Amino acid sequence: MCFCIDINNKKVLRAKKAIVCYKILDTYKTYDDEGLCSQVRRFIYKLNKTYRIFRWLKSDHEKEGIELYNKIDKGFHSYISKTYPNGMSKLQYSIRIQTLEGEVLVKCLIPKRAKYFMNDKQYVSNRIKIIEVL
């Protein structure tokens, strides 16, 4: 998931209370384990565990993980709404989820005091907690 940010609005926000958000994750199963993982980086998530990125800075020319081209790739990416992830209509999204085996929508929390950016569809935060498979 690529997060683009308005060059004029690069301010890091801090959550005053927990923020509900959503992610699309893959399911996996091995001979001794099963669970959820991110679709791009294959990061493994467990339910009800808070994950944190300790260092957003990537190099001297980047601030808070923002690349030169106004994209943020480091951080926990999530959607603001479960109804329209990836800009699809509810019907398109519903059909996509039903046809892709192993892909699930999960409800998450960006915890209170976490740092985050947001645009019109997504958040990128330094902390996230997966609370429920929908």
Image: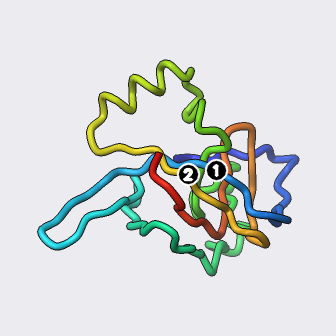
Q: Is residue 126 left or right of residue 106?
A: right
- Earlier sequence position, callout 1 versus callout 2: 1
* Label 1 residue SS: strand
Q: Is residue 5 left or right of residue 74?
A: right
> Which residue, given by chain and number where applicable, does mark 2 sit on?
107
Residue 42, quarter of picture: bottom left
- Residue 94 image offset from top left, x and y in percent: 45, 26
Residue at 59 percent across and 51 percent down: it is: 78
- Alpha carbon separation for disc pair 1 and 2: 6 Å
Residue situated furthest left in the rendering: 31
In the rendered structure, which amino acid carries the disc numbered 2? Lys
- Residue 4 image offset from top left, x and y in percent: 67, 44
Q: Is residue 84 left or right of residue 29?
A: right
How many residues crowd mark 2 within 10 Å: few (<14), some (14–19), many (20+)? some
Q: From what the image shows, is residue 125 above or below residue 40?
A: below
Of residue 107 and residue 37, the one placed in the foreground of this image is 107
- Residue 83 image offset from top left, x and y in percent: 59, 31
How many residues crowd mark 1 within 10 Å: few (<14), some (14–19), many (20+)? many
Of residue 6 and residue 44, the one placed in the foreground of this image is 44
* Label 2 residue SS: strand
> Which residue, given by chain and number where applicable, does mark 1 sit on?
21
Residue 64, quarter of picture: bottom right
- Residue 23 image offset from top left, x and y in percent: 52, 49
Q: Are marks 1 and 2 in contact (CB under 8 Å)?
A: yes
In the rendered structure, which amino acid carries the disc numbered 1? Cys
Q: From what the image shows, is residue 119 above or below residue 132?
A: above
Residue situated furthest bottom in the rendering: 54
Q: Is residue 63 left or right of residue 78?
A: right
